[in-house]
Amino acid sequence: MEKVGEFTTNIINALNLDIPTGTDIFLGDSNIKHMQTSHPNDFIRYGGDIADIILNPDYVGKNKKDNSVEFVKEYLVDNAFVKVAVRVSQGNTYYARSIYVLNPRRVVNFIRKGTLLKP
């Protein structure tokens, strides 16, 4: 298990999260396996950027379906929006659970609706 980031005051305030500033985000072996299996090409291309996406997201959001926190980075070179989804475990530990490229039209809609916010 490796620490890949933490929740900043800006993100906590933007998403109205009930956690302390500096709450750690980890990446475990099972999370890596899930990413490699579910989105292998996205993991190969962007997996090395997980910590940077969490540290410097262009947008953040909260997924109402699974309560995950979404960190989204725009890659202008690739014309891609890459999402790292972070979920809390039963032990109250936060893990980067998945990484994948989002549909750009959906991202624009999420921004317009206020589902994705600037941190």
Image: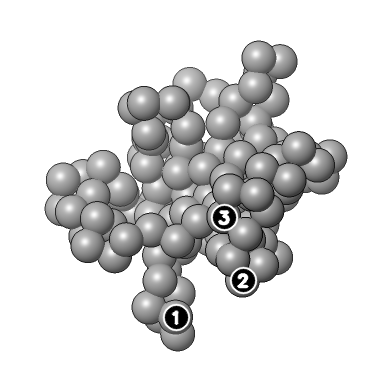
Q: Hey, what amino acid is under mark 2?
A: Arg
Foreground mark, 1 or 3, reads 3
Q: Which sits earlier in the primary sequence, circle 3 or circle 2? A: 3
Q: Residue at x 81, y 42 (%)?
A: 29
| Cβ–Cβ under 8 Å for marks 2 and 1 | yes
Q: Where on the picture, by quarter, is residue 105? A: bottom left
Look at mark 2 in the image and give the residue it sits on. 45
Look at mark 1 in the image and give the residue it sits on. 78
Residue 87: x and y in percent read: 56, 31
Furthest-top residue in view? Answer: 90
Q: Residue at x 47, y 32 (%)?
A: 68
Residue 17: x and y in percent read: 44, 27
Q: Which sits earlier in the primary sequence, circle 1 or circle 3? A: 3
How far, Cα to Cα, is label 1 from label 3?
17 Å
Give the left or right position of residue 78, taking residue 96 as reference: left
26 relative to 71, above or below: above
Looking at the rendered structure, the secondary structure element under dot 2 is helix
* Dot 3 crowding, Cα within 10 Å, few <14, some 14–19, many 20+: some
11 relative to 74, above or below: above
Q: Point out which mark residue 88 bears.
A: none
16 relative to 58, above or below: above
How far, Cα to Cα, is label 3 from label 2?
10 Å
Q: Where on the picture, by quarter, is residue 39? A: bottom right
The N terminus sits in image quarter: top right
Look at mark 3 in the image and give the residue it sits on. 39
